[in-house]
Image (cartoon, rainbow, N blue to C red):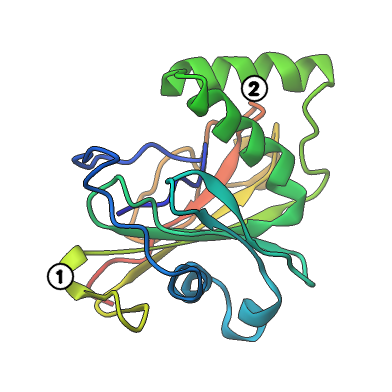
Amino acid sequence: MRALILAGLLSFAGLGVTAQEAEILPKEIQIKTATLAAPEEDRDGAMVYGYDETGKMVVLREGTNNLVCLADDPNRKGISVSCYSKKLDPFMARGRELQAEGKEMMEVREARRQEAEAGSLKLPDSPSMTYILSGEDEDYNKETGDLENSHMRYVIYMPYATTEETGLPDKPHLPGMPWLMDPGTHRAHIMITPPKDQ
């Protein structure tokens, strides 16, 4: 299983399964697993999107803080959940809509670029955090919602940020160091991927 992320954030490599094979976990388990990506003190107040019994993405819980979390996608191999700043929700939601229409990753990017430049897609006006937690199916407990041997990475969206203004390189020079991906574009973001052995 794997959550979108990022719902429009990143593309994931994974083997899909048919909707008939996908197991939709109970709402409480989806919420618990989704919020594992959030800082512990923010988990109880985060808004959570997950899946109903038909496999449709729905709001499982309204939130009280500034985070939105995405449950694991039951149609994808592996476990991937994410939480992001509410300022990113229009951007992420639009990505999910376009994917639901059957758009491929590059088509989604281009559509959001055009909409952002036209002013019809609201982008965050300040750095906006995304937490992404991933792991393997064999390390996931469907009964408790716990995930062992997980790996966290971090994405800080800064639309149109450049290497010149941030001082960040456009590729990592050392494992785990911050770097700026897609500089100067609507999807410019700082990537921080700690090494898995740490």
Looking at marks 2 and 1 on the same chain, the residue that comes earlier in the sequence is marked by 2
Position of residue 154 relative to residue 19, above or below, is below
The secondary structure type at the circle numbered 1 is: helix
Viewed as shown, does residue 43 lie left or right of 63? left
Position of residue 175 relative to residue 103, above or below, is below
Q: Amino acid at mark 1?
A: Glu
Residue 109 in picture, x, y percent from top left: 54, 22
Other-residue count near label 1 (Cα within 10 Å), few / some / many at <14 / 14–19 / ≥20: few
Q: Quadrant of residue 86?
A: bottom right
Circle 1 residue: 138
- Mark identifier at residue 112: 2
- The residue mark sitting in front, 2 or 1, is 1
Residue 12 in picture, x, y percent from top left: 32, 41
Q: Residue at x 50, y 46 (%)?
A: 6
Q: Residue at x 73, y 39 (%)?
A: 90
Q: Quadrant of residue 48?
A: bottom right
